[in-house]
Image (cartoon, rainbow, N blue to C red):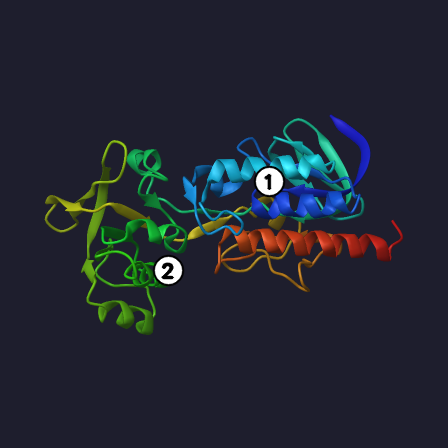
C-alpha cells in the first residue's frame, strides 16, 4: 500500500554500510528509513567470530556486531523495516521504492545492498559456513594457522586468496574444475612459485566433509570419475561475487560489466540524488570496516546534497 510520507533518505540494505549510513543520517536529523530485507544484517550475520573490526580487542560474533549496529542506528531515530525491495523508480524526485508490502518515497536514496559470494551449491557448503567454510581469506585466514586448507577457483581471486592464506596455513590446495586457469599470468606464476600451494586440476568438489567443522573435501576427477578425499580444516570459495544490483540497473543506475554500481563522484551514482555504499560498489576490498566507512561517506554526501537544496 502507498505511504504518503516523503523521507529525506531511504537506505536500501542493512549490512555495515547501510547501518553506518543510517547512524550518520539519523544523527544529522534526517530521520532515515532503512529497508533492510527479510534477512537483514548482511554477510556478517553468517559469520562467526570477527576479529578485525576496530574497537573489539577480544573479537565479537558477527550477528552480535550487527545487532549492536542496528540498536545504535535505532537509538538516534532510524526506522528499520525488515522487508525486501522489489523495484525502484528513479525517473523523477521524489524517488519511489517498493517492497512486497508497501511503497515509499524519498528525496534521496542510498543503495547499500552488498554483494553475495558465489557458491557451488552444496548443502554441506552452506551448513558449514562460519565453521571452516568461508569466502574471504583476509577475514578468516588467521583462524587457520598451521592448518591445511583448500581454495576453490581458477581466476585471479583464487590465486590471491591462496597466496594470502599461505601466511597462516601449512598447506593450500587450489581445486579447479578445468585444465586451464583464467587467472592472469603474473598471478598464476606467483601462486605456482609458492612452495605452500598445491594445484589439483580438472576436478569437481562433490562434498564438504565434517559435522560441526570442516574436516576435508571429497573431489571427483572429471576424466576418470574417481573420487577421493583431501584433508582440510578450511574451505575457501573464490569463484566470484554477485552484487545485488539487478533492480537498480533496471531503474537506470549505471553498473559495470560485473554488475557493480559505478560511482561518478565520491558516493554519487549517475542519477542525481541516488548514492551508493559498500560492497555493491566494491569488488576489491569487501571488508566490513571499508563498507562502514563508505556508509559514513554516503550519509555525509546526502546531508550536503539536501542542505544545498535547503531541505
Residue at 49% from the left image edge and 36% from the top image edge: 63
Residue at 82% from the left image edge and 33% from the top image edge: 5
Q: Is residue 249 left or right of residue 179?
A: right
Residue at 19% from the left image edge and 60% from the top image edge: 198
Q: 242 and 9: which one is in front?
A: 9
In terms of secondary structure, where does tag 2 sit?
helix
Q: Split into 4 quadrants, where in the image is the N terminus?
A: top right
In terms of secondary structure, where does tag 1 sit?
helix
Tell me, yes or no, whether the two marked residues, 2 and 1, touch with CB atoms within 8 Å: no
Q: Position of residue 228 (x, y in %)?
A: 12, 44
Residue at 44% from the left image edge and 38% from the top image edge: 46
- On the image, which quarter does residue 265 sit in? bottom right
Q: Position of residue 49 (x, y in %)?
A: 41, 42
The mark closer to the camera, 2 or 1, is 1
Instruction: Give me the C-alpha separation between circle 2 and circle 1.
Output: 30 Å
* Disc 2: which residue: 157
Residue 238 visible in the shown view = no
Q: Is residue 36 left or right of residue 2?
A: left
Q: Position of residue 182 (x, y in %)?
A: 32, 63
* Disc 1: which residue: 69
In this rendering, the answer to whether 79 lies above or below 172 is above
Q: Earlier in the sequence, mark 2 or mark 1?
A: 1
Residue density around tag 1, few if under 14, some if 14–19, many if 20 or more, within 10 Å = many
Q: Position of residue 144 (x, y in %)?
A: 29, 50
Residue 30 visible in the shown view = yes
In this rendering, the answer to whether 62 lies above or below 295 is above
Q: Is residue 92 left or right of residue 13?
A: right
Q: Is residue 226 left or right of residue 272?
A: left
Residue density around tag 2, few if under 14, some if 14–19, many if 20 or more, within 10 Å = many
Q: How many numbered marks are there?
A: 2
Amino acid at each position: 500500500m502507498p505511504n504518503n510520507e516523503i523521507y529525506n533518505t531511504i537506505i536500501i540494505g542493512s549490512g555495515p554500510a547501510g547501518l553506518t549510513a543510517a547512524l550518520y543520517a539519523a544523527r544529522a536529523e534526517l530521520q532515515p528509513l532503512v529497508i533492510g530485507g527479510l534477512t537483514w544484517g548482511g554477510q556478517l550475520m553468517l559469520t562467526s567470530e570477527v576479529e578485525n573490526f576496530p574497537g573489539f580487542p577480544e573479537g565479537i560474533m558477527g550477528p552480535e556486531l550487527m545487532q549492536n549496529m542496528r540498536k545504535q542506528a535505532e537509538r538516534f531515530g532510524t526506522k528499520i523495516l525488515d522487508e525486501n525491495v522489489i523495484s525502484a523508480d528513479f525517473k523523477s524526485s521524489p524517488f519511489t521504492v517498493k517492497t512486497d508490502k508497501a511503497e515509499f518515497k524519498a528525496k534521496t536514496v542510498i543503495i547499500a545492498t552488498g554483494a553475495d559470494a558465489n557458491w557451488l551449491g552444496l548443502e554441506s557448503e552452506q551448513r558449514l559456513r562460519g565453521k571452516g567454510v568461508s569466502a574471504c581469506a583476509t577475514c578468516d585466514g588467521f583462524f587457520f594457522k598451521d592448518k591445511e586448507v583448500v581454495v576453490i577457483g581458477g581466476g585471479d581471486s583464487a590465486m590471491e586468496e591462496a597466496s594470502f592464506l599461505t601466511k597462516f596455513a601449512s598447506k593450500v590446495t587450489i581445486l579447479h574444475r578445468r585444465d586451464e586457469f583464467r587467472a592472469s599470468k603474473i598471478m598464476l606464476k606467483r601462486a605456482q612459485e609458492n612452495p605452500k600451494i598445491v594445484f589439483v586440476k580438472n576436478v569437481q568438489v562433490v562434498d564438504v566433509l565434517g559435522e560441526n567443522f570442516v574436516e576435508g573435501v571429497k573431489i571427483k576427477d572429471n576424466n576418470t570419475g574417481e573420487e577421493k578425499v583431501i584433508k582440510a580444516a578450511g574451505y575457501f570459495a573464490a569463484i566470484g561475487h554477485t552484487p545485488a544490483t539487478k533492480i537498480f540497473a533496471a531503474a537506470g543506475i549505471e553498473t559495470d560489466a560485473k554488475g557493480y554500481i559505478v560511482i561518478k563522484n565520491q558516493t554519487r551514482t549517475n542519477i542525481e540524488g541516488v548514492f551508493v555504499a559498500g560492497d555493491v560498489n566494491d569488488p576489491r576490498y569487501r571488508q566490513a570496516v571499508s563498507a562502514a566507512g563508505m556508509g559514513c561517506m554516503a550519509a555525509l554526501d546526502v546531508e550536503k546534497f539536501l542542505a544545498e537544496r535547503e531541505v
